[in-house]
Image (cartoon, helix red, strand yellow):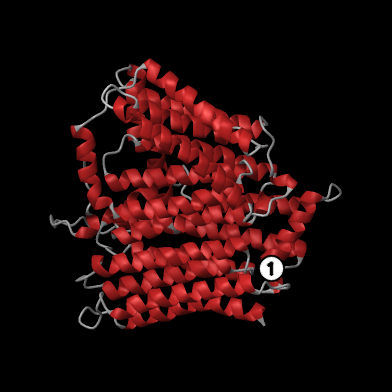
Amino acid sequence: MNIALSSVFLLCIPITLLLASALSGRLSDRARFNNKSTWLIKLSGLIVVLYITALVVSFALPSLHADAQYISQSRLSLLMMGLVVFMSVILIAFSRNYMAGEPRSGTYWHWLLNILAAVSVVVISNHLLLFWLGWVSISLALHKLLTFYPERPRAALAAHKKFLLARTAETSLLAAIILLYQQHGSLLISDLLSHFNAVATNDNLQLTTVDHIAAVLIALTALIKCAQLPVHGWLIQVVEAPTPVSALLHAGVINLGGFLLILFAPLFIQSTVAQWLVLIVAGLTTVMAALIMTTRISIKVRLAWSTSAQMGLMLVECALGLFELALLHLLTHSVYKAYAFLNSSSAVYEDMQRRLAPAANPKMIDWIVAGVFSSIIVSMAVMVIDYQGVWSVWLLLVLALTMLLAQRHSDRLRSSMMPVFLLSILLVISYSGFKWLFGAIIPATSAMHVEALSAVDIVAILLFVSLFVLNWMLRYQPHRPSIHHLHIALFAGLYLDEWLTRLTLQVWPVQLPAPSNNKVLDKATEVEEV
């Protein structure tokens, strides 16, 4: 009985959101729709209750046949549904005030709730067709919100590029689904994962050519969904959408590429071609997007480039077999990016404070002390947890802590170094603890572990070191002619989006709206220049 009961509670969440979406669509005019109406509060409370109930039933009465259902009750699905519910409550609460007085608020709520319902379907689906339909529904509903202000040419062009790329990703995913069904005769995700886990643990079994092709198509879908270079431009240009839409996109929807690789980890990690495709494309995106972000002054644009870089790093973690770390990255990035976008109005004040009280440039001794201390505490963490695996991710942690400590260890801030040292130790402990905790959520096989200093690990090390060195030179050696030229190229985004835009308009031309002469900036287009 518990099999049907817990699934029913999970399924009630997207159904509830869809019913609320239909209601808001009917009350689309401003006179009849009240953004601050109590039904939105009740909706938030209801989905929270449904999720908690499903969680309690699932753990209190574990099912012996849960894998045979269309609704997944895996720990990964339950955790992702928790993130969806959390984000839904936050976005509903924020949007009630943000969209107050908007003439088309009913339309906004209709498509927002549609997206939340579709995301819910994707994360709890155990059937590939249901998974794909939810995936497509997310993209189509998001297109309506990205063009919420259709009179803006920049937003229309970005949405047009996103529309074409989304169709490409959906076609790639559908092709992978068809191949997997033809090869294995099942559309249940749990059945497919059981087979790939068996292949990973049995030396007599191997992936077929069809499986490898499906893995590459899944990897390609993830790269497009996560806005990796050179198909990143739309993500940078959709900042003209309402701020809650930006938060929804950057904190939720774009993470689905990472979720896709985590879900199909047993297949992806056994396909060398798919693994290297993700490592090279996502690795280069991580480095370039992070460097380009440092040249931007617009808060929302910096956050957009940051999202592209963070998604790249998350995919690199998948390519390294660190799926538990990728899941942790997905969750923490979602929460951070939602806060960053919804709190972007205060970013100007914070940046002014930094400009009025700049820290002195670190000296060579500062870098040495920071590097030695970071290496010591990270090495201790590795020994304590008896870590066996790739070294690149730990090197990245050392480099990040070195940068943090050296920038704080200046003549003006030496008196405040002890809190930073303690914070560094806390970060390493937290990182190690959460990595172990999320490892219990992702069932790992021996094939999912990449060996230390393997070719994949070495390439990742080179990428991380390059990012650290180039970032250091851009920040502390800007007077060098070569660095100045690099800064100009980075400011132009390496001209990658211009190439893609021309290609997109050649493949499918679009009539853009004429630029508006209205000088009044409404709150949906507040992009602070600091």
What residue is shown at x 32% (from left), y 68% (from top)? 93
| Residue behind mark 1 | 187
- Of 37 and 527, nearer the camera is 37
Can residue 370 be seen at all in this image of the molecule? Answer: yes
356 relative to 83 in the view: left or right: left
What residue is shown at x 60% (from left), y 53% (from top)? 262
Q: Position of residue 306 (x, y in %)?
A: 39, 43
The quarter of the picture where the C terminus appears is: top left
Neighbor class of circle 1 (other Cα within 10 Å; few <14, some 14-19, many 20+) is some
- Of 449 and 29, nearer the camera is 449
23 relative to 210 in the view: left or right: left
Q: Residue 379 lies in what quarter of the image?
A: top right
Q: Given the current orientation, which residue lies at the most extreme right position?
A: 204
Give the answer, above or below, for where 69 lies relative to 179: below
The quarter of the picture where the N terminus appears is: bottom right
Q: Residue 525 lies in what quarter of the image?
A: bottom left
479 relative to 131 in the view: left or right: left
- Amino acid type, mark 1: Leu
- Of 84 and 250, nearer the camera is 84
125 relative to 521 in the view: left or right: right
Give the answer, above or below, for where 482 lies relative to 528: above
Q: Position of residue 419 (x, y in %)?
A: 37, 35
What residue is shown at x 65% (from left), y 74% (from top)? 61
SS for dot 1:
loop
Q: Position of residue 99 (x, y in %)?
A: 25, 68
Can residue 502 be seen at all in this image of the molecule? Answer: no
What residue is shown at x 62% (from left), y 40% (from top)? 320
Q: Residue 148 lies in what quarter of the image?
A: bottom left
- Of 470 and 73, nearer the camera is 73
Image label count: 1
Q: Position of residue 399 (x, y in %)?
A: 47, 29
